[in-house]
Amino acid sequence: MFSSISVIIPVYNGQKFIGDALESALRQSVAPEEIIVVDDGSTDSTAEVVESMRQSEPTIRLIRQPNAGQPVARNRGVNSAHGKFLLMLDADDRLLPNHIEVLHSAARKSGVAFSDYQVIDINSKVQEAHHRLRAAEVRLPNVLAYNYFPIGGSMITRDLWEKIGGLDEKLIGVEDWDWITRALLAGYKPAHVPLPLWQYRFHAQNTSRNPHRMVQSNLARLDKAFGEMNLPIKYHRYRAFSYLVNHALAAGQFLSIGNETEALYHLQQAHLKAPHLFYSLQLFISYLKMYALNGGHDLAEKGVAAVLLATEIAEEEQEKTRLHALGLMSLGLLLAKRPAQALPYLSTVITKHPTVFLEVGNYRTLAHYTRMYATEMARRLYVG
């Protein structure tokens, strides 16, 4: 049996996508009792779009407020809802038709449930048919360093929400991270459904892609976790690691927008927070592969230089670190089908430190492109 379900949608200037989000909530195999849209001070036609749909769909409710941020809007939606189950939906995302039907039973048992999702672009074209979340990692202490829980698309019982408390309205952009940390600390374990039940829309206006706001909120989240949250003493040994990871992540985010000064600052902060962990540099180097994979090999090269500036390490280790990063970049470029750009990096690494590839993984790709590299080198020698 399905208890009453409220869909909560905070929105700011979402006229382009809010109709899609509402349609997806209305077309569920199990209908929600109500769909609450909280317009967070939009200056576009968001409210008009919602009002137009509301005329023929009485389950839609519209609440308008001055702009205060997404956590404030989501909290207000929850406080205005009547349902025993709260389904969180972002205004630019969409639910797949069986979302409520499948997730409800999981949420009933655990208090909070989430699922895998699909990735769509600005035109609603599916870019990734099944994005698998690392559900086993949603536990303390992992969530202190990494956010494995997306509140968008999740379902939470009102009982659990009231026990844990609402979203921290000061932590814009990482409020879900803070919330799941508090839930885990209180002994709750979210249930995971390994099926794509909703669609995450990736585009330039996502809250999660505003690096300045994200970095500020994220460091405040860590200060809160290791301060007022009163974590058991056993978790405090993860403090240095958590700060290191998030400063390294901040560096990567600033590199992605070309702000090398801020990137270097956060790398230096990572080194200050945990020099013994930063020494190997594995965490930051893992981000370089991501940039290379997305065609940003020039950013990755700048990242290598920034890493070497951020800390003083022995000359031999510095060279190995540089080659390790180049190895990751070359594999990323190969996976992105950019062999011409990967070739110079492959040449450098294979010549100076071929065993680096034993550490960066993806041996099948490496074997294939090493043959390609050898063929290309032979061709060049023959032509020359």
Image (spheres, rainbow, N blue to C red):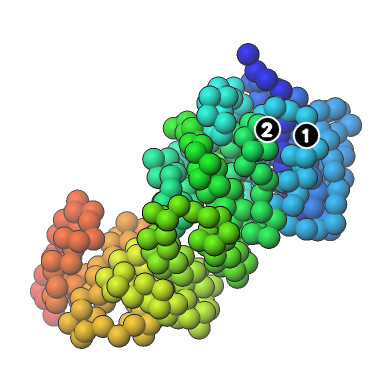
* Residue 309 seen in the current view: yes
**Where, quadrant-wise, is the N terminus in this rendering?**
top right
> Around disc 2, counting alpha carbons within 10 Å, would you say few (fewer than 14), some (14 to 19), or many (20 or more)?
many
Q: CA distance from mark 2 to mark 1?
A: 10 Å
Which sits earlier in the primary sequence, circle 2 or circle 1?
A: 1
Is 372 placed above or below 314 here?
A: above
Figure disc tally: 2
Give the secondary structure at mark 2.
Answer: helix
Front residue of 266 and 325: 266
Whether pointer 2 and pointer 1 mark residues with C-beta atoms closer than 8 Å, the reply is yes
Q: Quadrant of residue 199?
A: top right
The residue depicted at 66 percent of the width and 49 percent of the height is 167
Is 183 placed above or below 297 here?
A: above
Q: Which residue is mark 1?
A: 81
* Residue 211 seen in the current view: no
The residue depicted at 18 percent of the width and 67 percent of the height is 356
The residue depicted at 68 percent of the width and 38 percent of the height is 162
Q: Seen in the image, is 48 located left or right of residue 137?
A: right
Q: Which mark is residue 158?
A: 2
Residue 143: give x, y in percent of width and height. Answer: 46, 51
Q: Seen in the image, is 351 located left or right of residue 56?
A: left
Residue 238: give x, y in percent of width and height. Answer: 39, 60
Q: Amino acid at mark 2?
A: Arg
Give the secondary structure at mark 1.
Answer: loop
Q: Amino acid at mark 1?
A: Ala
Q: Seen in the image, is 280 located left or right of residue 201?
A: left
The residue depicted at 31 percent of the width and 69 percent of the height is 277
